[in-house]
Amino acid sequence: MKNKQQILKALNGNLVVSVQPVDNGVLDNPLCVSLLSQAAVNGGAAGIRIEGVDKLLHSRRHLKVPVIGIIKYDLDDSPVRITPFLHDVERLAQAGADIIAFDGTDRIRPVSREDLIAAIHAQGCLAMADCSNQADGDFCAEHGADIIGTTLSGYTGGPVPELPDFDLIKYFAQKGYFVMAEGRLNTPEDVSKAIACGANCVTVGTVLTRLEVMTDKFAQATKTK
Ligand SMILES: CC(=O)N[C@H](C=O)[C@@H](O)[C@H](O)[C@H](O)COP(=O)(O)O
């Protein structure tokens, strides 16, 4: 097992940048993900979250900070997207992930959450559960997940809310979990508020690494009078 306490200590009170460029965009390749990751670390990120084995492998050797690895799918028979399969756990670990994040929701899925957590631990990595609600976090924490994230709050049905789920951050913090605030944290003020709500660490993605999405918002703003 990697040094759990050392990894959690490195993340505690700090920022993770999720470097997941827009799918199939010009930045969506191993070289760009590696450079964006290094730039994020140079700017103060204490950890990096990367999707895909090639991008992880390419970036890892330039990074000294903890790296969270995931693999995303769009499955026909399950709404679960983030690291649904056991064989990918081994691939992510071999590519150098310190932490492997998986969908921690209670939905139809190819592999149980318990089996994923066990497989992640068997590879010597920390398990991060991307949760959508209190019950997801409680279940995954009870089954040994090392980090409980709010990643999927707002993404399991219905319209996506505008704001982060600060109440869920508070709930997980009050339960004593190592809490990763993640999802729609779009400003430094959001990050401060997440920390004030008890988050141990905060992950920011879109506003920092999805250039097309953010540019579009600014471009649209020129069209409003
Ligand atoms: C819901 C889902 O699939 N979230 C994904 C998880 O890996 C990413 O698309 C997000 O960018 C990441 O969680 C960071 O969040 P934000 O981009 O809002 O800062």
Image: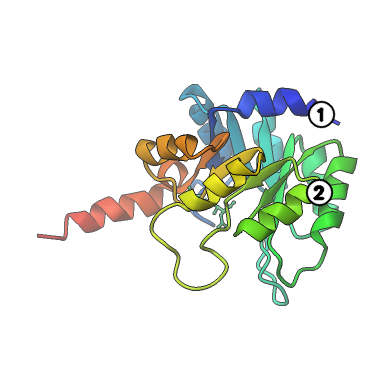
Q: Position of residue 142 (x, y in %)?
A: 79, 50
Looking at this view, is 180 or 203 the one in front?
Answer: 180
Secondary element under disc 1, as helix, strand or loop, is loop
Residue designated by label 2: 89
Secondary element under disc 2, as helix, strand or loop, is helix
Q: Within 10 Å of the Cα at label 2, are there few (<14), some (14-19), or many (20+) other Cα atoms?
A: many
Q: Is residue 74 above or below residue 89?
A: below
Q: Position of residue 144 (x, y in %)?
A: 81, 45
Residue drawn 42% across the image and 62% down it: 161
Looking at this view, is 168 or 39 the one in front?
Answer: 168
Lateral position of residue 52 relative to residue 225, left or right:
right
Q: Name the mark on residue 152.
A: none
**Which residue appears farthest toward the bottom when viewing the image?**
77
Lateral position of residue 177 relative to residue 203, left or right:
right
Q: Is residue 74 above or below residue 200?
A: below
Label 2 amino acid? Answer: Val
Q: Is residue 63 visible?
A: no
Cβ atoms at labels 2 and 1 below 8 Å apart:
no
Residue drawn 73% across the image and 22% down it: 6
Lateral position of residue 151 relative to residue 148, left or right:
left
Residue drawn 24% across the image and 58% down it: 220
Residue drawn 49% across the image and 73% down it: 158
Asked if the beta carbon under badge 1 is closer than 8 A to the nearest atom of ligand 1, the reply is no
> What whole-number distance in Å separates the C-alpha atoms at marks 2 and 1?
15 Å
Residue designated by label 1: 2
Q: Position of residue 82 (x, y in %)?
A: 67, 57
